[in-house]
Structures are given as C-alpha cells and as structure tokens.
Amino acid sequence: MKFERLTVPQWQLPDLVAFNERVRDRIEPWWQRKWVRRGTWTALGLFVFFSGVWLYFASGLPSSEKLLAYEPPLPTNVRGYDGDLVQTFARERRVELAYDEFPPLVVNAFISAEDKTFFRHGGIDYAGLIGAVADFTTKSVTGGGRAKGGSTITQQVAKYLLKDSSYNIGRKIREAILAFRLESTLSKQQILEIYLNSIFLGRNAYGVQSAARAYFDKDINELTLPEAAYLAVLPKAPANYDPVRATQKALDRRNYVLREMYRNGYISEEQWREAATMPLGTIRYGSNEKFRQQGGYFMEDVRRSLMKQFGENADNGPNSVYAGGLWVRTSMNPMMQDAAAEALREGLAKFDGAGRGWIDTEKSVDLSGDWAGALDRAPIGVGFTDWRKAVVLSKNAGEARIGFTNGSSGTLARSAAAMPKRGVGGVAFDYLRPGMIIIVKQESPGAYALRSVPKIGGGFVAEEVHTGRVLAMQGGFDVVGSAYNRATQALRQPGSAFKPIVYVTALENGMTPASIIVDAPFCVYQGAGLGNKCFVNFDRRYAGPHTMRWGVEQSRNLMTVRAASETGMPKVIANAKKLGVGDFPNYLSIALGAGETTVQRLVNAYAILANQGRSVRPTTIDYVQDRNGKVIFRTDNRCALMENCNAADWDGKTMPRPPSRTRQLLDPMAAFQMVHIMTGVIERGTATVLRDLDRPLFGKTGTTSGPTNVWFVGGTPDIVGGVYMGYDQPRPMGHAAQGGRIAAPIFKQWAQTALKDQPKVPFVAPAGIRWVRIDRASGKRVYGVFPTKEDPKSSVIWEAFQPQTEPRRSYRRSGNPYGEEDVDPRQQQLQQLQRLQQLRQQQRAAAAQRPRQVAPQPQPSVLPTTNTQ
C-alpha cells in the first residue's frame, strides 16, 4: 500500500511574551496605587473567608439528590381482621398530601401569616433578615430575651430538615445555605408542600391535614376561612395560642391573619369582617378519634414485632415503624379482642377485688403545677371504660374532692372508700392525701367510688385453628399499667392442661380411649438419696380402674403418670417439643404439667390437636405494605415459593397449586381421638360450666400445686382460646382456686360474645376413624342401645377408635350390666390388682423365711396371661 505525505498548514503562533508585556504595562500603574492593592487583597480575603465558611457550614447538609427524594416521616397505620383501622404508631401524627390537594384558602392563609413574599424571594427575605440581625444584636447586648425570627417559609423548611432548634448564628447560616439549595433544587410548590406537610401545629399534629383533624375534626378541604386562619397562627408557637388556655390571644392572632389576607388581596373586606366575628370553634383535645385505639397488648406485640423486623426510627431504614408510613394488616378481630380484655379484667377484678382490700397506686402529682397534665401522663391503666384516674385535690372528714385528666372534678364520699387497705387494715379513706393518684368508678353524676387495680395477673389468647392467626390477645389488666405481656412472656406451669399431650402420645402408641388405667397409688424410686416419689390426685383419693376417657374428664393425676410411664416419657417430651409447648427434661412430673410454658404456646398446641395434628404457627401480622402500597412482608409466603403464581398469562400448563403450609406433626386419628375425649371434659368433667354454651366444644382445665396458677384451654373446631391466672411472682391463690372455677368462667364470658355469631360446626373425624358404641364406665362394646344427646352422662356413648383397636368382646345391655349375669370389668381389674399384691406379699414372706445362702427356686407364675372377663 502506498502512503501519501500529509501537508500541515503553516499557522502563525501568537507571541505570548509580547501579550504578557502589554497586560503588565496596563496593570502595573494601577497596582502601584495603594488602595487598589488593599482592595484586591481584601476581596481575596473575603472570598477565602466566605468560601471557608460555606465549606464549613455546608458540610453535612442534604444534597440536591436527597432533597428531590425527600419523604416526610409518616406514622404506621394498623388494620384489623376486617380491614378497619384500629391503631396508629406515631410520634409525629401526619397525613401527607400533594400540593394540589391543599385548598388555595389554606395556602393563602399560611403565606399571609408566615411569608407574604414567598413566591418572589429566592429563599431569604433580606429586609426581614437585616431586621432580625439588628434585633438579635440589640437583645444580645441588653439581654432582652430571644430575638424575632425573620425566617421565610423556605428557611423554616430548612430548619425542619436540619432537625436543629439551637439558638445561635451557626444554625442560621446553615439554614440560609440550605434555603439557597432548596430554592435551586425544588420548585416553590414543592417547598410549600414540604412545609404544609411537616410544620408542627400542636396537639401532636404535624402538617395541616393532621391539625385540621386535631382541632376541628375536619378534612382540610372542609375548613372554613376563620378555621384556616387559626391554623395559620400555630406555626409560631402552638402552646401560646392554645384555644382553651389562651383563647383571647388566639382570637387576636387569628384576626391578624385575616387582616393580612385581606391586605394581600386573598379575601374581600366583607369576608374579613364576617370571619373576625366568628369564635374559634375548636374541639376538645382527643375527641376527634375516628376510631378507638384498640388492641392493647395485641397491638403492643405487633409493634414489637415490627420494630424487630423494620427498625424504630428513620435511622434504621426507610420502612421504620415511626417514620416509614407502613400499612399493616393484622389478624386481630376487634370484637373478640374487646371481649377478651373485658372477660379477663372481670375475672381478675372478681378474684382480687375490693373484698381483699384497697391497693395504693403509690403515685402522686404536684398540685401546685399542671396537675391535670401530670395525671394524664401518669403510667396507670384503669382497664374498664367506666373507671378513671383521679387525683385527690382536697379532703375533709366526710368526703374528698378529686380531679380528672380533663381538669374537671368530682366527689369521693367516705362511704365509697370504706374498704380496708390491703395488708394494713383500717379504712382506705383515712389513707387518702392531697396529690395522691387513685382509681375511681362513677356511681352517679359527680359521685365516685374507690377502686384498685388487681395484683393478680393473667393472659388470654384466641387463635384460628386452621391458619394459626391470633384473633385476640390480652396480657394483663391494662397495657398502660404493665407492658409485660403475660400471654406471650410469662412462663408458667400449665398443670393438668398439659395432660392431653400425654394422652395423645399414649393414643399414638397403642392405647385407646377405652383403655383401662388404674387410679391407685403410684411411686417411683429416685435413688438412694431421694427415695420414693409418690404422686397423688388433687383430692388425694383413689378410684381404681377406669377408662382413659374418664381419667381425662376427671383430671386424675395418677392415671396420667401411669399412662406416661407405660408410653415412655421420652415420647411425651418429644411430642411436647414438636408441638412447641417446650423442651422439657425427662422427669415423670412433667406429665402433670411441671414444665413451664406460655398461654400462646399451649393454645397453639391445642390448635394443632383440633387441626388433626397438622402444624400451625401463631401469627399476629398478615402482611405489611410500605407507604407506596408495595407489599414488603407477607406471613403466608407460599406465592413467593411457587415463583409462578403471579404469571401475567396462562402458560398452557396445569394450574399452579400452592404448597401446603402445614406438616403432619401427630397422627391425625390420635389427635382427633384426643379432641373427642376432651369434649367429655365439657359435658361431664371439670369444665361443665361451659356446657350451656350449647355448641361443640373441647377443652381442658389446669390447676398447679399450691395452687399458684389456674388454666383453661379449649374451643371449637375453628377457634381455640386459652386463659391462665396467677401472680407475677408465683404464690398460692388459695385452696379453692381451680381451673374449672376461675379460668373456665373467663373463657365462657369471652365465648358468649366472641362465638355468638359463629356457626355451630361439629368436629369432623379424619379418614379411618371407627365409631363404636361403648359403655362409658367400662369401655366395653355395646349393642342394642344408642347414645342420647339429651343426657350428657348417658352410660352409652359413641367412641372414636383407630382401625383394629376397638373392643372385640361385648355384651348386650339389657337391664343392669353389673348384675348377676355380667361382671363389672372394673371389678375384675381391681380383683386382678389385689391378686397381684397378694402374690408379691407371699413371695416376700417366703423369701424372708428361706435361708439366705440358699438360692430361691423359681416360682410358677400365677398371673393370668389373658383377660378372664
């Protein structure tokens, strides 16, 4: 290839030396002048100084990108089972609106009150700034207090973004720098949108929409002219223009805003004059709730779960509880939750009520200050809706004047506080003193009676059987007085409520509901140092041989430990761990509920039994959405596991089927048998107080040694609930305390409300169950007679058996089955036990008489190898 030579054009280069000499010749004469040199150096110094100041104060300020992406902190809104709003988690109550959603009336009111040149200046009002600097200088010298602000709306937004309320020049410089950056990055409408959504207006209201609800119980588009003008007053100092404590001052300032709106041309003179004559028209603080804050312990459990997963504040991430604007769907059924709270409180108050004496709250307030506010902030929960916190204002011999959180007062007569003080005696009225915080119940208008919060605690949980969704949770008397959730945190011995786990294990390992178990003394040897451990029944009596069903219904301890011993405690403990009740040591006493668990765990175990042994996990949150509606957490994540359930169109393949979210933990037939046995606890056993609910129910009571705790757990085929009661520091509740007498009535009160509209669904047996008519007392199969639903104590019942386990021998029930023609099988078992004891006694006597050096000869066994009944 041939290359041609390139021709480079001949350009004449500039004479830089000559150019430099010409510039120097022109500048040199000026530079020789002193004032020019001084001015130049001064300008350079000022440039360096201001550049340094800018770099120093601008460091750490939000960048333009952050300003464009800014999102104000929003509260978390929580919805219940039916989708209705039930709770908010907020430190700053705010409703975010777009600029177009703010009515011009509201925008004009705030511009007139705060920054009438907002749409004309570049971020700083220089005239106002000079006045503010002069005022600051004057008051700094004279010590005349805080100088006036002079900040524009842009500077107020900058102050809010900086989260700095310090009173110094440095903060104002940072505000000014950020104000310039805001003006160069955002439009005026965007700045005003941030301002109207963020400004604090009192009553824990941030933003104009939230304030409109707090002060007038209206949405922002429903505000009248005087109402909008009043809200525009509040950014300066909400406390100084409180509608209750500073009414006239608030009116004067509102009328000033109306006058400024007129002068700025936003309203006519007639509108101004008319609006100025109107009262403030605000509502009482706290009366604007569109929904009642519900949930108590349930919502506290939800809050803790959310904080653990998403964080508490904005520093923890964009979806934090108190700034992320989350929308949370929970499983709480408001009606069931209210019923649970009411039932548990009634039970606690009834057990530990006024008859045991009045209990001092041990809290007081200073009456010389804002006693109403201090009383409102006192961490005392009153539980019942008709109970109130009060403070003793004054007292004489016959009555005491008491005050309430809203500033009102009432009378407490001596006769209404005549109960003794617990642990001391005397009359409770004599111990009252001014400033003491007490709890009262209104008896008549203006007249109240003394009450006290029960010392005893308790917990209640209701759970959906097939999903594990927790429908109600109450962890004590009132979450305000004690955030300790006894439903999920209190580890307590369940007592006899643990027995179904023992018996379902026995049913899995060859026993049947008709198996005969002897209710007789049972001892185990614990070693040379401990000797024998002998178990006893609650009533310390023995009933001889009985069916497993009878042992469960009557809650017989000795039959339970025999069943556990024959089945094997390792198997019982393995099932307890599998069901989530607890990981217990291998001790026989665990069979009687000596291991500790919580209400929620035990309720979930019973739900698994009612779900025919299929696992469920208790949950309180269904799903969580971010502020834009995107689902960021879902409890039921089967769709994500499938990976194809959100396909845009059918792909021609078989329909995707969600995988099962449960697994089989127990034999379904054994689980159903256990539930069917526990229906007898309601019909004939220790929980007959629930029989008149007149619906299919199963359950089990529990009473621990002492007794220190009482339990009831049970429910329907769809909903299982459980309740326990006991002191936080376990101590005896009294000998008469039993699960059937105290815990079961609490469940009953809840069920009367919560299950009132629930359909009466029967328990459905799994495939393979065989229904056999048996004699309830003996467990023998019966022909010719059918059970009767009218009589719960019918001698003939339908019993559920697994294949090939039903009784084979039977007799026809004609007349008395225990007459001369037929032998009572229980009597046969008792006779067999007596023969066994006699044989052992004979063997021991023979061994004692025989010389020790002679080995004993083997004795022929006289024990029957088969039943002789």
Image (cartoon, rainbow, N blue to C red):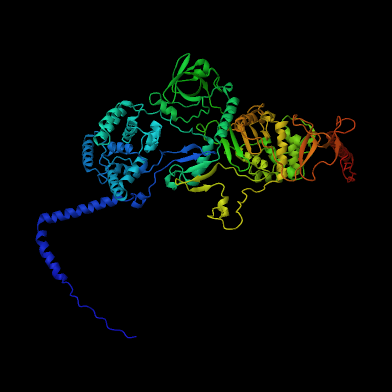
Of the pair 514 and 595, the residue shown nearer to us = 514
Residue 355, placed above or below residue 577: above
Q: Residue at x 12, y 66 (%)?
A: 22
Q: Position of residue 247 (x, y in %)?
A: 33, 26
Q: Residue at x 43, y 26 (%)?
A: 405
458 sits to left or right of 811: left
Residue 428, placed above or below residue 105: above
The answer to which image quadrant residue 194 occupies is top left
Q: Position of residue 702 (x, y in %)?
A: 67, 34
The answer to which image quadrant residue 697 occupies is top right
Of the pair 409 and 794, the residue shown nearer to us = 794
Q: Position of residue 588 (x, y in %)?
A: 71, 40
State which quarter of the image contains the C terminus.
Answer: top right
Q: Residue at x 11, y 59 (%)?
A: 31
The answer to which image quadrant residue 313 occupies is top left
441 sits to left or right of 280: right
Residue 737, placed above or below residue 846: above
Q: Residue furthest bottom?
A: 2
12 sits to left or right of 314: left
State which quarter of the image contains the N terminus.
Answer: bottom left
Of the pair 617 and 650, the residue shown nearer to us = 650
| Residue 427 in sight from this viewpoint | yes
| Residue 456 in sight from this viewpoint | no
Q: Position of residue 24 (x, y in %)?
A: 12, 64
Q: Tally the numbered discs.
A: 0
483 sits to left or right of 615: left
Q: Residue furthest top?
A: 398
Residue 120, placed above or below residue 204: below
